[in-house]
Image (cartoon, helix red, strand yellow):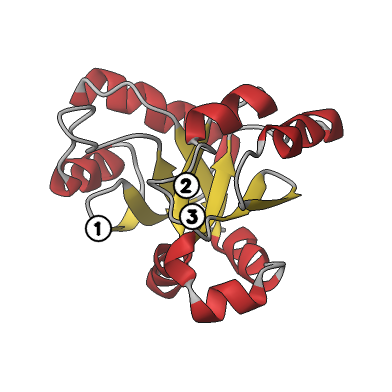
Amino acid sequence: MSTTYIALLRAVNLGAHNKVAMADLRELLGTLGMRNTRTLLQSGNAVFESDLSSSELERILEAGARTQLRLSTDFMVRTKRSLVNLVAANPFHKEAANDPGHLVAMFLKARPAATAIATLQGAIRGRESVRAKGRELYVVYPDGIGNSRLTTAVIERALGTRATGRNWNTVLKLLRLA
């Protein structure tokens, strides 16, 4: 049975770093057997259908990107159902309604330990708020992401896993596309 998946690429098309055209990404997905592929924005968001598991897809997509696109990056793959659950579980309802550009869903490669979440909470130096659920984080940046010291690098270091973030507007667009 086919499942709808969302693939989120880490750190692509940021300046000259890890450049990939979305047409090339769609072609890669097609050559690797994904069906009904579509992309959103230029920041590495894809929706497709497959019969494989998300962990199998992450391995296949990362290897395919390395060999076919000369792109070394992490893929965080989630089911449409998990994205629906992420939206439903959002603990920051007011921020999602009033300032969705400053609410970020961080998709993690692995589920962090409770002690790692505590370490991350201790690393916050500004007015940011963080809540964890499974392999996702919800982060509110009330003073803006660009002004924050709570960077992806800080999050990854504290949690001991790779991460990629999407603002709430993009999360909702991905859900509609799926």
Residue plotted at (39% across, 32% down): 61
- Report which quarter residue 20 is drawn in: top left
Q: Considering only vertical position in the picture, is 121 above or below 73?
A: below
* Quarter of the image with the N terminus in it: bottom right
User: In the depicted view, which residue is nearer to us: 12 or 94?
Assistant: 94
Q: Name which of mark 1 and mark 2 comes first in the sequence.
A: 1
Mark 1 lies on a secondary structure that is: loop
In the picture, the quarter occupied by the C terminus is bottom left
* Foreground: disc 3 or disc 1: 1
Taking depth in this image into account, of 3 and 82 the one nearest to the observer is: 82
Secondary element under disc 2, as helix, strand or loop, is strand
**Residue 17 image offset from top left, x and y in percent:** 22, 27
Which label is found at residue 165? 2
Give the residue at mark 1. 41
Q: Amino acid at mark 1?
A: Leu
Horizontal side of residue 78 vs 133, given as left or right: left
Decide which of tag 3 and tag 1 comes sooner along the chain: 3
**Amino acid identity at mark 3:** Tyr
Pinpoint residue 67: horizontal percent, then vertical percent: 25, 18
Tag 3, which secondary structure?
Answer: strand
Q: Residue at 48% of width from left, 65% of height from top?
A: 168
Residue at image point 23% right, 42% down: 25
Instruction: Give how far apart the Cα atoms at labels 1 and 2 are.
Output: 14 Å
